[in-house]
Image (tube, rainbow, N blue to C red):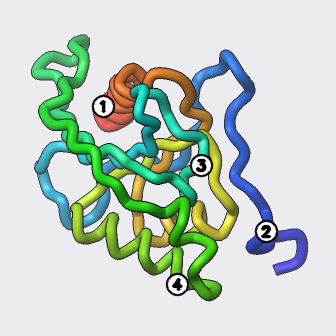
Amino acid sequence: SPGAPGPSARAHPAAPGSRLESTRLGRAKGRGDVAIRICVPVNPDGTIDPRWGRAARVALVDVEPAAEAEGEPRITGWNEVAVGWDVLHDQSVEGEHHARVARFLMENQVTHVLAYTMGGGMAHMLQRMHLGLGMGAMGDARAAVREFAGRIQAQEQQ
């Protein structure tokens, strides 16, 4: 449609120091009451890799909502996976890399993606997959996941 962002458009992060920008935070369809699973790109030092589609590693993080309305969600699992998207991205024909990422997310029952930034095509694909998406994440990956999970929980309680 006219004025709609094309495939080269980028999903931009929130301004530094601001709260994370996000789209639909609810649980993905088909997961029922299973704990939230967030996929986040990570560096070896535990910080967020700013390159979602070109990340070398991602963490699959299982989060359980807090038992009380005012409590904080709890990380119950943290599994880092060497995905190699940094190398595979440029070895793929158009569309193949997005399919690879989608397959990984589906196979690992991911409900949400947390990243700093990503291309508009990738963001659109994740939204079509009905995944919650948090953008603008920086710094310590565990802290960013806890903050994002708290926002998911707060939205679900509304």
CA–CA distance between discs 3 and 2? 15 Å
Question: For the view shown, which residue lies furthest in the right direction?
Answer: 3
Q: Which residue is mark 4?
A: 96
| Residue 51 badge | 3
Q: Which of the two labelled residues, at mark 4 and mark 3, occupies the earlier sequence position?
A: 3
Residue at 55% across, 32% down? 137
CA–CA distance between discs 1 and 2? 32 Å
Position above or below: 85 against 37: below
Residue at 23% across, 24% down? 73
Q: Which of the two labelled residues, at mark 1 and mark 2, occupies the earlier sequence position?
A: 2
Q: Is residue 158 visible?
A: no
Q: Is residue 53 visible?
A: yes
Image side of residue 63 versus residue 43, left or right: left
Q: Are marks 1 and 4 in contact (CB under 8 Å)?
A: no
For badge 2, the amino acid type reads Ser
Q: Which of the two labelled residues, at mark 3 and mark 1, occupies the earlier sequence position?
A: 3
Q: From the image, state whether disc 1 or disc 4 is nearer to you.
A: 4
For badge 3, the amino acid type reads Arg
Q: Which residue is mark 1?
A: 153
Nearest the eye: 104 or 44 = 44
Nearest the eye: 16 or 44 = 44
CA–CA distance between discs 1 and 4? 34 Å
